[in-house]
């Protein structure tokens, strides 16, 4: 059996994937870490204080874990959900009643609730430990934008089951957009953008219209929110997460003193 | 060589031992020191040869004389001297590390002969330290040390190096002249908008790029606003005026068209009008409660009378009316594209109701 292991490890297939042998000393451990795409994302070594739970609460890590859970469960749900007026509600019911491991829908929903809670706790912890002070102030800003993206993910995802709760929640929420200054047709300054007698900002051309894709929450809104929820906002969040983690390391490490 | 005023303890000790070890050499060393000392008038250095000369008298074997004894002998002379004498001594002591370091190579030649004679003899602290410091001190040297080193090593070398004849710098040719910066920006020098954006090929290129980006951004923004809306027709028929009894609220058009057709009084006049089913609070759909004769919104409890006026809950204004008229075939026609708000006084508009 030992021979088999050696045979595999000395095969060209193995050596082409794992370019370095199994490390037995610190230098080779570092080499493996730094030359591996997945492993290099995590620092080779961190300070002991970085895993002090009473200090970090680990909420940032939990939030990122939940983000991954949401991504995986979300992708799986996409196989059985169609974002149309005809099928949206029925597909959710089917996921609950008929699909194997349809509990994924609940996991996705509970994960979303949990992620919102943990992201607030993470923000709270960062504030309490003063981890927003220079040189970490830019990372705080990135974090706030990530918070907004998390809330937007919740908002756009809420519509997708297309039940009464969803439709009216999004109606009420998006109605706020029509009161935007200048860009909302019921907000102050909407008349400022009147060009040659034509209202540039009306109920069919204001910010709310751009958000919903129509004058009322309907099929276009469902499609639009589906794309926002599954593609655009997760991509933006992934980009900002990369910057967020990069800055943590560059600014002195997690929970590192200044 | 050695500055008599700043002679350190170690230097004193070395002097003592040199005198004893090689009497003639020490004496020859002493004489320039004496000359240096005598050249400075009023200085207490006149006393400094004394400890040097008296020390050999005191010692029998330099190697066996302890440091304390040497110091005591040296101080014995110092106590008879002026008060200024102690000053150079502490100064000498303070400067001890550096001059000692510079000095050891100076004393190297004499020290080697002196130490050679002492090699068989038990060593005291200073001799051990001096022997240890015999090797050139590693690391950077201060300028004072380097100067003393150069002084001791090769005065010939130094003399050869001292005077380097550097010819004066020739004048810069015309093409290399640096123009003096103008203090005042005149009108001719000021950069304009055109020159900034179109002044060079590079500027034109980047301006074009920026313009293209801007146009692209605007294009993408317009992309997000659909040009075609698919909506139910805004005009629809809701039956004949005679179908409506006085005080009646018709709810059968609520689901499909989002309108209640009501026949009731407003400001003393009996009217048929079409009320919007959108609550003026946050947009939910109220329900008509026949028993209580009011519209009640399930979301936050806003209440409206039959004529659409809000009276309870968070609704800030009455329900909105849609335009209604009698069509060519005699049926009532509602047009949702026109809205009338009571709080703006628009319910007086004849298009907002049909007199009944």
Image (spheres, coloured by chain):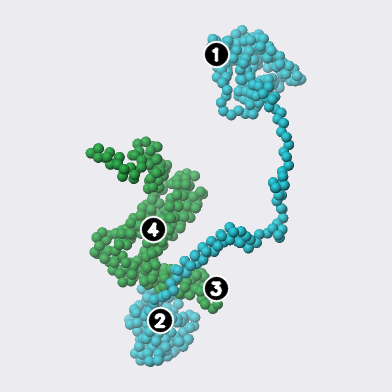
Chain colours: A green, B cyan
Residue A143 position within the rendered picture, expressed as x and y whole percent measured from the top left: 45, 55
Q: Quadrant of residue A150?
A: bottom left
Q: Is residue B95 left or right of residue B316?
A: right
Label 3 and label 1: CA atoms lie apart by 100 Å
- CB contact under 8 Å: marks 3 and 4: no
Quadrant in which the N terminus of chain B is drawn: top right
Q: CA distance from mark 1 to mark 2?
A: 117 Å
Picture coordinates of residue B209, whole percent (x, y): 53, 61
Q: Quadrant of the C terminus of chain B?
A: bottom left
Residue tagged 3: A192
Q: Quadrant of residue B101?
A: top right
Precedes in sequence: disc 1 or disc 2: 1
Q: Residue furthest right?
A: B41
Secondary element at tag 3:
helix
Q: Is residue B340 in sight in this rendering?
A: yes
Which chain is mark 3 on? A
Q: Which one is closest to the eye, mark 3 or mark 4?
A: 3
Task: Determine whether the residue tagged by mark 4 lies in a helix, strand or loop.
Answer: helix
Q: Which mark is residue B234?
A: 2
Query: What residue lies at 52% left-to-right and 73% top-to-bottom?
Result: A190
Badge 4, how many Cα within 10 Å: few under 14, some, many 20+?
some
* Residue A42 visible in the current orientation: no
Residue that carries the numbered disc 4 in the rendered image: A116
Residue labelled with disc 1: B123
């Amino acid at each position: 059996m030992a021979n088999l292991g050696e045979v595999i490890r000395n095969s060209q297939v193995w050596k082409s994937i794992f370019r370095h042998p199994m490390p037995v000393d610190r230098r080779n451990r570092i080499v493996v870490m730094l030359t591996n795409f997945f492993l290099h994302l995590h620092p080779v070594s961190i300070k002991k204080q970085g895993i002090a739970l009473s200090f970090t609460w680990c909420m940032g890590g939990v939030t990122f874990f939940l983000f991954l859970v949401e991504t995986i469960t979300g992708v799986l749900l996409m196989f059985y959900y169609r974002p149309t007026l005809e099928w949206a509600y029925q597909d959710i019911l089917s996921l609950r009643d008929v699909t194997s491991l349809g509990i994924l829908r609940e996991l996705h929903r509970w994960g979303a609730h949990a992620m919102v809670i943990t992201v607030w706790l993470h923000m709270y912890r960062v504030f309490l430990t003063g981890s927003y002070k220079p040189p970490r102030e830019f990372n705080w800003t990135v974090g706030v934008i990530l918070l907004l993206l998390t809330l937007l993910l919740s908002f756009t995802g809420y519509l997708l089951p297309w039940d009464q709760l969803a439709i009216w929640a999004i109606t009420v929420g998006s109605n706020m957009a029509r009161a935007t200054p200048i860009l909302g047709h019921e907000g102050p300054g909407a008349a400022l953008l009147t060009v040659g007698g034509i209202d540039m900002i009306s109920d069919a051309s204001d910010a709310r219209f751009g958000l919903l894709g129509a004058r009322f929450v309907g099929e276009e809104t469902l499609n639009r929110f589906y794309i926002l929820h599954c593609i655009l906002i997760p991509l933006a969040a992934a980009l900002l997460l990369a910057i967020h983690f990069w800055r943590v390391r560059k600014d002195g490490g997690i929970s590192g003193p200044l | 060589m050695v500055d008599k005023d700043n002679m350190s303890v170690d230097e004193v000790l070395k002097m003592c031992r040199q005198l004893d070890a090689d009497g003639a050499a020490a004496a020859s060393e002493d004489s320039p020191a004496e000359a240096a000392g005598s050249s400075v008038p009023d200085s207490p250095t006149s006393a400094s040869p004394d400890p040097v000369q008296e020390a050999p008298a005191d010692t029998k074997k330099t190697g066996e004389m302890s440091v304390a004894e040497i110091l005591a002998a040296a101080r014995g002379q110092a106590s008879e001297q002026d008060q200024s004498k102690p000053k150079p001594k502490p100064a000498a002591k303070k400067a001890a590390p550096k001059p000692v370091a510079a000095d050891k190579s100076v004393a190297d030649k004499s020290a080697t002969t002196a130490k050679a004679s002492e090699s068989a003899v038990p060593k005291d602290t200073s001799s051990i330290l001096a022997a240890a410091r015999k090797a050139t001190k590693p690391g950077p040297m201060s300028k004072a040390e380097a100067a003393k080193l150069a002084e001791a090593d090769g005065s010939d070398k130094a003399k050869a190096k001292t005077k380097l004849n550097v010819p004066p710098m020739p004048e810069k040719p015309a093409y290399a002249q640096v123009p003096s910066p103008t203090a005042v920006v005149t009108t001719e020098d000021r950069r304009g908008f055109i020159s900034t954006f179109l002044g060079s090929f590079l500027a034109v290129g980047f301006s074009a790029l920026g313009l293209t980006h801007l146009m692209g951004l605007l294009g993408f923004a317009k992309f997000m606003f659909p040009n075609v809306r698919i909506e139910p027709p805004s005009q629809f028929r809701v039956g004949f005026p005679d179908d409506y009894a006085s005080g009646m609220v018709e709810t059968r058009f609520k689901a499909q068209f989002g309108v209640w057709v009501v026949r009731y009084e407003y400001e003393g006049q009996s009217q048929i009008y079409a009320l919007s089913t959108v609550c003026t609070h946050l947009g939910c759909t109220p329900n008509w409660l026949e028993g209580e004769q009011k519209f009640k919104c399930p979301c936050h409890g806003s209440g409206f009378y039959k004529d659409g006026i809000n009276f309870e809950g968070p609704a800030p204004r009455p329900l909105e009316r849609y335009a209604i008229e009698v069509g060519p075939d005699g049926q009532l026609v509602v047009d949702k594209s026109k809205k009338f708000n009571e709080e703006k006084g628009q319910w007086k508009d004849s298009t907002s109701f049909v007199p009944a």
